[in-house]
């Protein structure tokens, strides 16, 4: 888990690590298992990214590129449809060889367009994954600072929590601190464009 590795120097616990600890079992208080005075906090990694200004900027870029791709797809579909209708009309006037050659060229063009558009669509998830990595690479020190401000020593991912109290979640405070420190993350190193 990215957050857990980002604050590795601070002391971490996951559900599996906690279960392997000496004497820890369900129903036992964490304080008794980990030692008096230790305080845990959790963060929801998905919400941390999604609700931050950084994550919202990434989503806005994906949405804009998606709309541009949809417009491009519509224009290409209109072009291919017109060409297909043209070929249908030429069928009676061309020799079978000429028609076959033009039909094959049309099929190749359609296949090339499909492949190009699929690659552009795949670029969206590649862009999002790249930006997520950049986000979490830059948030480790911020999360550590928020953890200290919360008076806690151990940060776990929210999905590792089986039972917890709402006060254990520091996602909101972490988002505020990340927004203050990183804003929207600035220009990505590999911008998302639809040529």
Image (cartoon, grey):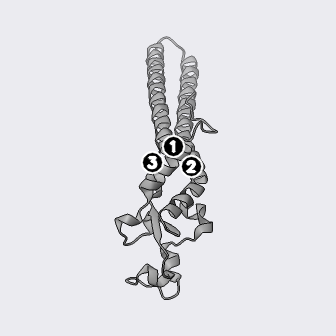
Q: Residue at x 59, y 63 (%)?
A: 5
* Above-or-below relation of 27 to 58: below
- Give the quadrant of residue 7: bottom right
* Above-or-below relation of 1 to 22: above
Q: Residue at x 58, y 57 (%)?
A: 140
Q: Residue 118: x, y in percent?
A: 53, 37
Mark 2 falls on what kind of element?
A: helix
Mark 3 falls on what kind of element?
A: helix
Quick one: label 1 or label 2, which is nearer the N terminus? 1
Q: CA distance from mark 2 to mark 3?
A: 11 Å
Q: CA distance from mark 1 to mark 3?
A: 8 Å
Q: Residue most toward the bottom?
A: 23
Residue, disc 2: 135
Residue, disc 1: 54
Q: Residue 16: x, y in percent?
A: 50, 76
Residue 182 horizontal side relative to residue 162, left or right: right
Q: In which quadrant will I find the N terminus?
A: bottom right
Mark 3 Cα shell of 10 Å, populated few (<14), some (14-19), many (≥20): some
Q: Residue 168: x, y in percent?
A: 40, 66
Cβ atoms at labels 1 and 2 below 8 Å apart: yes
Q: CA distance from mark 1 to mark 2?
A: 7 Å
- Disc assigned to residue 50: 3
Mark 1 Cα shell of 10 Å, populated few (<14), some (14-19), many (≥20): many
Mark 2 Cα shell of 10 Å, populated few (<14), some (14-19), many (≥20): many
Q: Residue at x 46, y 66 (%)?
A: 41
Mark 1 falls on what kind of element?
A: helix
Q: In which quadrant will I find the C terminus?
A: top right
């Amino acid at each position: 888990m990215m957050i857990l590795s980002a604050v590795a120097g601070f002391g971490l616990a996951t559900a599996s690590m906690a279960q392997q600890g000496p004497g820890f079992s369900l129903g036992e208080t964490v304080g008794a298992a980990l030692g008096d005075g230790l305080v845990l906090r959790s963060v929801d990694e998905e919400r941390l990214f999604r609700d931050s200004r950084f994550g919202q900027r990434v989503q806005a870029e994906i949405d804009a590129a998606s709309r541009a791709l949809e417009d491009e797809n519509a224009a290409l579909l209109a072009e291919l449809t017109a060409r297909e209708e043209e070929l249908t009309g030429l069928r009676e006037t061309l020799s079978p060889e000429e028609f076959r050659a033009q039909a094959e060229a049309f099929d190749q063009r359609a296949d090339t367009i499909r492949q190009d558009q699929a690659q552009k669509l795949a670029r969206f998830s590649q862009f999002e994954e790249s930006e997520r990595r950049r986000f979490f690479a830059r948030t480790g020190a911020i999360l550590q600072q928020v953890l200290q401000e919360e008076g806690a020593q151990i940060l776990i991912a929210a999905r590792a929590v089986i039972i917890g109290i709402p006060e254990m979640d520091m996602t909101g405070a972490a988002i505020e601190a990340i927004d203050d420190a990183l804003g929207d993350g600035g220009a990505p190193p590999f911008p998302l464009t639809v040529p």
